[in-house]
């Protein structure tokens, strides 16, 4: 009898917790609907269902990968803010592909079934229900999985676009994935700006190592490491926390700069670091700066981080951005003109993540409304993103962009050369200077080798005439204008 009562108590507690989450989610949905409008809410957010609550992280399910990626890029931060406002203990929102029956809902169904069996006096058999208590040899692995974040299956070495700015970091990551704990590569420290591919490479390493099934990998952000450590202190389970982390074969910590100023967490990470390296285990760390530039970290930790392989990821080049966009566009199955890809690669230069998000948004718009992708549509759909990247155009910048486009020397803009291959781009630059700046004709002429204002007038008239007659030429000028205009 007491066993049945305790079973029902557990069911009641699980249902109560689930009901509380449902109430909070209902409030969040109401706020989102008011913020984004009925149409946008039905299109993107209505299909979200609640998954399990794991410590300070709530899982939300979406039915397709496309929806998950879109919601993550457009609403991820807002969802986290709203959940934290409802339940301050929730600090992270994980968006996954799943159905309404996955996660917490599925768990509730399993509890209901077990309760029904208990009430009727029947014992569940292994054939009809999973074992409640895992085998002893699996429990350590399960505790490690609870501690770590899941790896994103999209982030593989095959999907990583390699170029000059990231080829060294890519080669180092490949080496660690093939031979972990190699001399000189432990730890592997990846650093670079936001959205340049550090997290992608870390997930790729983890996925590659786990493919064989014999290597245990724990990946988490430095923020999650800190929260798990604090939770272990509060629950007086720090020894279990230490054992879980120090039993993995590969530990990967993302965004280490988050630990700056957190002295106790730094100390715990330092001891974990030493224990794993001394045991021949691999450590991979990422941050926004090199170890020597991470002021605020303990000197002993910075020294240890710099004793392995340090690989930086530079800002992307135009060629690399084009390669990334071409690969993403090809994978989407939507025809994106080369002119549009060039426009995006010129306008969004600092962050690959934002670049990919802009392309995803453009493709989603084309899919939803059945429209082709054009330069005009791109500027309309991405007006908010493009506005953030706008800046005041100068004649010098116009000259540089036009020279790059037609592959001539910058000095040709002010030279006396009259060859058509030089004169035509120079005329285009004068035309754009007249269209995009407030400079007078004499001022523009002075910037082009002290030419007379009548020369500028002739250039503007000539380019206007050619644009009316030659569609390809008009597209080139329009592309340059959209890249430059503020």
Image (spheres, rainbow, N blue to C red):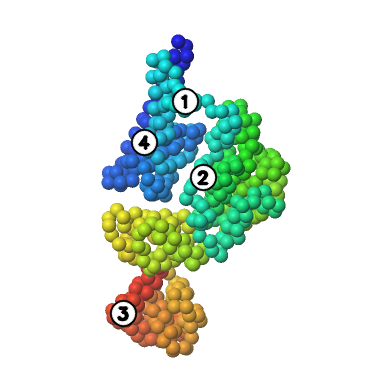
Mark yes or no: residue 55 visible: yes
Residue 321 at what x, y percent from top left?
47, 63
Tell which tag, 1 or 2, sits nearer the viewer. Answer: 1
Q: Secondary structure at mark 4?
A: loop
Alpha carbon of mark 1 to alpha carbon of mark 3: how far? Answer: 75 Å
Check disc 2 and report its element: helix, strand or loop: loop
Of the numbered discs 1 and 2, the one sitting upstream in the chain is 1
**Location of residue 253 in the rendering, given as x and y in whole percent from the top left corner:** 59, 45
Tell whether label 3 touches label 4 (CB within 8 Å).
no
Q: Which image quarter is the C terminus in?
A: bottom left
Which label's residue is closer to the chain start, 4 or 3?
A: 4
* Nearest the eye: 485 or 103: 103
Residue under numbered circle 4: 100
Give me the residue at 39% from left, 31% from top.
105
Q: Which residue is label 1 attached to?
A: 126
The image shows residue 395 at horizontal and vertical percentages of 44, 75
Q: Which residue is mark 2?
A: 151
């Amino acid at each position: 009898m007491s066993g049945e009562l305790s079973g029902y108590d557990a069911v009641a507690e699980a249902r109560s917790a689930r009901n509380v989450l449902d109430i909070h989610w209902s409030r969040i949905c109401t706020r989102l609907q008011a913020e984004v409008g009925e149409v946008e809410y039905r299109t993107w957010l209505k299909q979200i269902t609640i998954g399990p609550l794991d410590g300070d992280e709530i899982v939300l399910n979406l039915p397709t990968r496309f929806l998950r990626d879109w919601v993550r890029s457009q609403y991820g931060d807002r969802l986290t803010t709203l959940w934290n406002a409802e339940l301050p203990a929730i600090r992270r929102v994980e968006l996954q592909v799943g159905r309404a029956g996955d996660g917490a809902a599925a768990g509730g169904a399993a509890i209901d079934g077990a309760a029904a069996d208990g009430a009727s006096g029947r014992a569940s058999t292994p054939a009809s229900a999973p074992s409640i208590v895992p085998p002893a040899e699996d429990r350590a692995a399960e505790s490690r999985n609870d501690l770590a974040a899941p790896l994103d299956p999209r982030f593989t070495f095959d999907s990583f676009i390699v170029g000059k700015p990231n080829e060294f970091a890519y080669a180092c990551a490949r080496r660690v994935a093939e031979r972990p704990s190699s001399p000189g590569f432990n730890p592997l420290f990846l650093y670079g700006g936001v959205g340049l591919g550090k997290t992608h490479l870390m997930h790729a390493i983890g996925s590659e190592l786990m493919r064989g099934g014999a290597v245990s990998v724990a990946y988490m952000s430095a923020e999650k490491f800190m929260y798990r450590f604090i939770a272990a202190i509060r629950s007086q389970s720090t020894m279990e926390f230490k054992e879980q982390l120090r039993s993995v074969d590969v530990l990967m910590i993302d965004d280490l700069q988050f630990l700056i100023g957190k002295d106790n967490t730094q100390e715990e990470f330092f001891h974990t670091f030493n224990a794993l390296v001394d045991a021949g285990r691999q450590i991979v760390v990422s941050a926004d700066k090199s170890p020597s530039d991470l002021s605020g970290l303990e000197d002993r930790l910075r020294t240890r981080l710099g004793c392995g392989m340090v690989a930086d990821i530079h800002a992307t080049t135009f060629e690399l951005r084009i390669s990334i966009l071409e690969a993403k566009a090809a994978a989407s199955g939507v025809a994106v003109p080369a002119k549009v890809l060039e426009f995006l690669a010129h306008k969004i230069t600092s962050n690959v993540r934002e670049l990919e998000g802009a392309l995803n948004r453009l493709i989603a718009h084309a899919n939803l409304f059945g429209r082709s992708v054009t330069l005009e549509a791109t500027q309309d759909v991405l007006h908010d993103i493009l506005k953030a990247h706008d800046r005041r155009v100068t004649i010098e910048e116009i000259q540089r962009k036009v020279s790059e486009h037609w592959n001539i020397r910058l000095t040709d803009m002010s030279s006396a050369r009259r060859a058509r291959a030089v004169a035509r781009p120079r005329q285009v630059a004068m035309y754009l200077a007249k269209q995009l700046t407030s400079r007078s004709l004499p001022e523009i002429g002075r910037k082009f080798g002290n030419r007379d204002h009548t020369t500028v007038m002739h250039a503007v008239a000539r380019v206007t005439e050619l644009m009316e007659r030659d569609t390809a030429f008009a597209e080139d000028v329009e592309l340059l204008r959209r890249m430059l205009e503020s």
